[in-house]
Amino acid sequence: MKLKWRLPLMMLVIMLSVVAAACSRSDNNGGSGDNGGKGEEAATLTIMAEVGSHTDAWKSVIPQFEEKYNVKVNVTELPWEQYRQQLNMQFTGGRGSVDFDLAYVPIGWVPEMQNPGYIAPISEGGNIDQLQLDDFPGIENAYFGENEDLYFVPYMNETHGILYRMDLFEDEQEQAAFEQRYGYPLAPPKTMEQYKQIAEFFHRPDEGLHGVTLMGDNSLLLGFHFYNRLFNYGGDIFDENYRPAFNNEAGIQALNDVKEMFEFTSAAAKQYSWGDASGEFLQGRSAMAEMATTIAQISQDPDQSTIAGKVGFSGIPTANEGDQDIKRFYLPFGFVMTSSSDAKEAAFQWIEFATSPEMMEQAAPVGNIPARVSVLEGPLSEQYPYYLPHSEIMQSAKLLPLPLIPEGATVTEDLLPSAISQFLNGNLSAEEALNQAAREVENLMESTGYYSN
């Protein structure tokens, strides 16, 4: 009898002790609040990302997030060349169950993660109305699936444009010589014809100066030179039935435009990759560069650029001055949430925190081009003069990400650049190159069921 009486009493004492300890923790922390309950063991959030400057930017605010939410953030970074392969291996090898909660990716990768269910709608972690989505240009492209759910929140939006040497464009002698030769003032080009004439004017290889920097390496970057011109002339990658819409007069004119511009580049430009091209421009060896806003950002850094403080940025010229509603590809990078994550609430908190205007503004100088208009047009625009023209492009162009279908990357990063390269190197005519690419695209799309009906 004595043993039966002591056992319930011991259990009661233990229960009272647990309750007392919990009350003590609540009193010390002032309730759970934003910090998720400091004093408790921190939750853990794992983010996969590529090694890069905008990754460095959002990493810089991790300590503040950890302090606010009592969440430990681990970041697994991989070089760009390995990153996509590793993501695919994680998803397919684990049948969708992975050991990370968020991935930082370009929007073009989202469909191949969303279609099989590897990533979850952002709303599974919290109320998306809290994200102030109207501040993101192009946000309509971030909704996927039959229910049109938000699966992607931008952190960095990159556009292509014309970087130009303000010291050359504003030089009085250069201005006078240009106007005498071409009959109009020297200024950033508005049309493709002006662009060619300015490149021709500044192309002085004997003086170590080229008219323009382009990227001829067989890659997406070469593709961008073609796509921007294709849109100018009314062409497109696909029609509404996913048939090729580039092997036509618009495509031929766009290819010929690209080839003409290479007349005013370095002789090595047809082999230039991103690093080669950025190095040439940042070392002051060309008057213009047809590149992305990332290089405009790097050009401001005197440790990486000999022309710091001398670089302007303007949009890709149109076929005719005043052309409106021209399509432009852009490259948004941002966060997606994995379906298998057990920390979706914390993942949402991270997205809301890192993409907030305050944190974007704080992190931008580390190496990011903010995705929010309010930040682009805020106080940082005085420090980074390319922010305002970039913001104008983002709001005025008909923004398109690269085709948001699983086959989109193969078409835009492989099949079309290969055909363009063959044309530039004299292996195929413009018509032959485009028809070859069209056949390859149709074969790919047919094999994956786009033409079954």
Image (cartoon, helix red, strand yellow):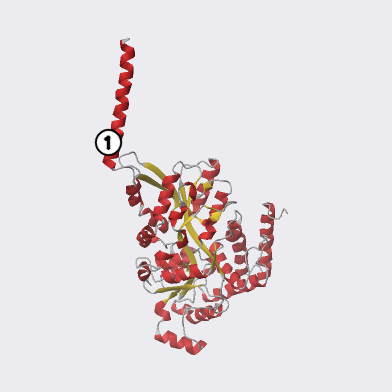
Image quarter where the N terminus lies is top left
The picture places residue 343, in percent across and down from the top left corner, at: 44, 43
The picture places residue 264, in percent across and down from the top left corner, at: 52, 76
- Name the residue beneath numbered marker 1: 24
Residue type for callout 1: Ser
In the image, 163 versus 263, the foreground residue is 163
The picture places residue 295, in percent across and down from the top left corner, at: 44, 66
- Residue at image x 33%, y 17%? 7
* Residue 216 shows up from this direction: no
Task: Determine which quarter of the picture holds residue 141.
Answer: bottom right
Task: Determine which quarter of the picture holds residue 285.
Answer: bottom left
Is 141 rendered above or below residue 88?
A: below
Q: Is 428 positioned to the left or the right of 69 in the image?
A: right
Residue lying farthest bottom? 180
Is 248 rendered above or below residue 55?
A: below
Image quarter where the C terminus lies is bottom right
Residue density around tag 1, few if under 14, some if 14–19, many if 20 or more, within 10 Å = few
Q: Is 140 positioned to the left or the right of 58 in the image?
A: right
The picture places residue 218, in percent across and down from the top left corner, at: 56, 62
